[in-house]
Amino acid sequence: MLTDDRLEDRASGLVGYPDLVREESGLLTVVDFKTGLAQGEPTEGQRRQLLLYAVLVQRWCGRWPDRLEVEDLTGDRWPVDYTPLAAEVALREAEDAVTSLNSAIEQGAVATLACPEPETCRWCPYRTRCGPYWDALKLEWEHRSVRGTIVTAVSDGELANVAVRIESPRDAMGEVVRIGGLRGVETAPDEGAVMSLVDL
């Protein structure tokens, strides 16, 4: 049994930490634990993650897993369909993605790789600075994110209150939103400056 150990494929540079790898009744199973409350059928992203774990397990023990599964907080499990060929294809796609990213970084064109989607962007730590995110953002994404021009700003040295004329989400453009209690703002932001806020 292997739990949360670092596995590596030195040839490709792929590294991962499968939650659980175990053999029961001769069947080698890789399980990925999910903490969300509404798991349901595995997403394509979850399937891809498990396919890459399958590659790592094969490199680690010389044997392909018999099963790939996602398990939620209640202990319910969902199998993920896979073949060793599909896992190898996922590895090649990951390698191609890394090559494209490195090339885009060298050319200063990282934003061209962005594919904004509600779930893809929801927890991304770079969204405050991501132009494609702000261009694509809609109210229906329910991200509680706003980008716009500061109309008024007041700070008491610890907290700031601002009014922002919305530029994104585009379907709220022109509206003014008032945001109070911003922490870590020692001086009031400049009126007319652009401010990006997420998880309001």
Image (cartoon, helix red, strand yellow):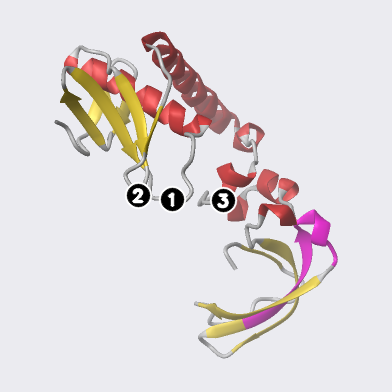
Quadrant in the rendering for residue 83: top left
The answer to which of 106 and 171 lies nearer the viewer is 171
Q: Amino acid at mark 1?
A: Gly
Does residue 10 appear in the picture of this structure? no
Asked which secondary structure carries label 1, the reply is loop
Q: Are marks 1 and 2 in contact (CB under 8 Å)?
A: yes
Which of marks 2 and 1 precedes in the sequence?
1
Q: Quadrant of the N terminus?
A: top left
Residue 89 versus residue 43 in the image, above or below: above
Q: CA distance from mark 1 to mark 2?
A: 7 Å
Q: CA distance from mark 2 to mark 3?
A: 21 Å
Query: Callout 1: few (<14), some (14-19), or many (20+) C-alpha neighbours within 10 Å?
Result: few
Q: Amino acid at mark 3?
A: Arg
Instruction: Point out residue 75 in the picture as x, y percentages from the top left corner.
Output: 32, 44
The label on residue 122 is: 3
Which of marks 3 and 2 precedes in the sequence?
2
Residue tagged 1: 36
Q: CA distance from mark 1 to mark 3?
A: 14 Å
Query: Callout 2: few (<14), some (14-19), or many (20+) C-alpha neighbours within 10 Å?
Result: few
At a point 59% along the width and 62% down the height, the residue shown is 198
Residue tagged 2: 73
The answer to which of 67 and 162 lies nearer the viewer is 67
Range drawn in magenta: 161-174
Nearer the camera: disc 1 or disc 2: 2
At a point 51% along the width and 34% down the height, the residue shown is 43
Position of 181 with respect to 133 (left or right) is left
Asked which secondary structure carries label 3, the reply is loop
Q: Are marks 2 and 3 in contact (CB under 8 Å)?
A: no
Nearer the camera: disc 2 or disc 3: 2
Asked which secondary structure carries label 2, the reply is loop
